[in-house]
Amino acid sequence: MKKYFITGLLIWIPLAITVWVLALIVRAMDQSLLLLPPAIRPETLLGFYIPGIGALMTVLVVLLTGLVTTNIVGQRLVRFWEGILSRIPVVKSIYYSVKQISDTVFSGTGEAFRKVLLVRYPHPQAWSVAFQTSAPANEVSRQTGEELVSVFIPTAPSPVNGFFFFVRKQDTIELDMSVDDALKYIVSMGVVTPAPSDASAGRMLGQAQNE
């Protein structure tokens, strides 16, 4: 009986957590409906609430925004809007900081969150999985006189929180592991072990053949 119960849990727990996370995301995106006047909200027009309408609307707005801003007129509107924001002291700092982060992460051309590293944390006898974010600012490198790297050390099981450090490059180990595999490793608290990459598997096979 115990064996069957545990087997059932192994089936339902991942499914339940997946549904719960998706429901949280949908409900959060449905909050975009609050931007509409109450008279034209879907629940007012239809008489009942349909989950996911706000999420669908959010996706459509994002797609239309990307479509509009790819032409010359849209780019001028963006520059005009950013010019207005740049004149508001506090808003300027927040907006441009977030914009720089999003441009770096989602552009696919930068090095942010492209490398998975091992770093000594929280003490010299321990290792932690970290993501390399960028090269340190010139002032940081000048003051330390060492070759440093900027790293983000996520916490488990919630990788959206963590710590930001500068560490010596020579004290890091670059892992042959994708960012997705590293995130799964962190979220599962080490239970889900990343599979060897093709390059690693090839090296392991070559070593076995040589032996």
Image (cartoon, helix red, strand yellow):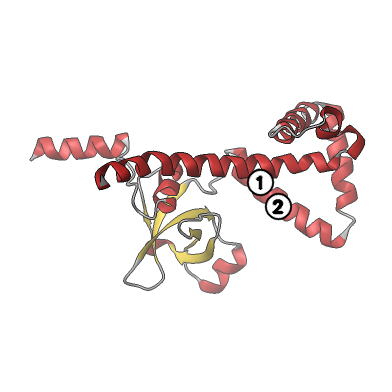
Q: Give the quadrant of residue 197.
A: top left
Q: Is residue 166 above or below residue 201?
A: below
* Cα gap from disc 2 to disc 1, whole angstroms: 6 Å
98 relative to 8 in the view: left or right: right
143 relative to 206 in the view: left or right: right
The number of numbered discs placed on residues in the rendered structure image is 2
Percent position of residue 125, x then y: 31, 71
Q: Which residue is denoted by mark 1 in the rendering?
A: 102
From this viewpoint, is residue 108 visible? yes
- For image coordinates 41% across by 71% down, the residue present is 122
Kind of residue at disc 2 = Val
Percent position of residue 4, x then y: 28, 41
Count neighbours of disc 2 (C-alpha within 10 A) and say few if under 14, some if 14 to 19, many if 20 or more.
few
Percent position of residue 43, x then y: 81, 34
Q: Which residue is denoted by mark 2 in the rendering?
A: 98
Describe the element under mark 1 as helix, strand or loop.
helix
Task: Classify the position of the C terminus by image quarter.
Answer: top left
Percent position of residue 186, x then y: 42, 53
Q: Is residue 17 above or below residue 162?
A: above
Q: Find out whether the residues at labels 2 and 1 contact each other: C-beta distance under 8 Å.
A: yes
Which of 145/193 is in front? Answer: 193
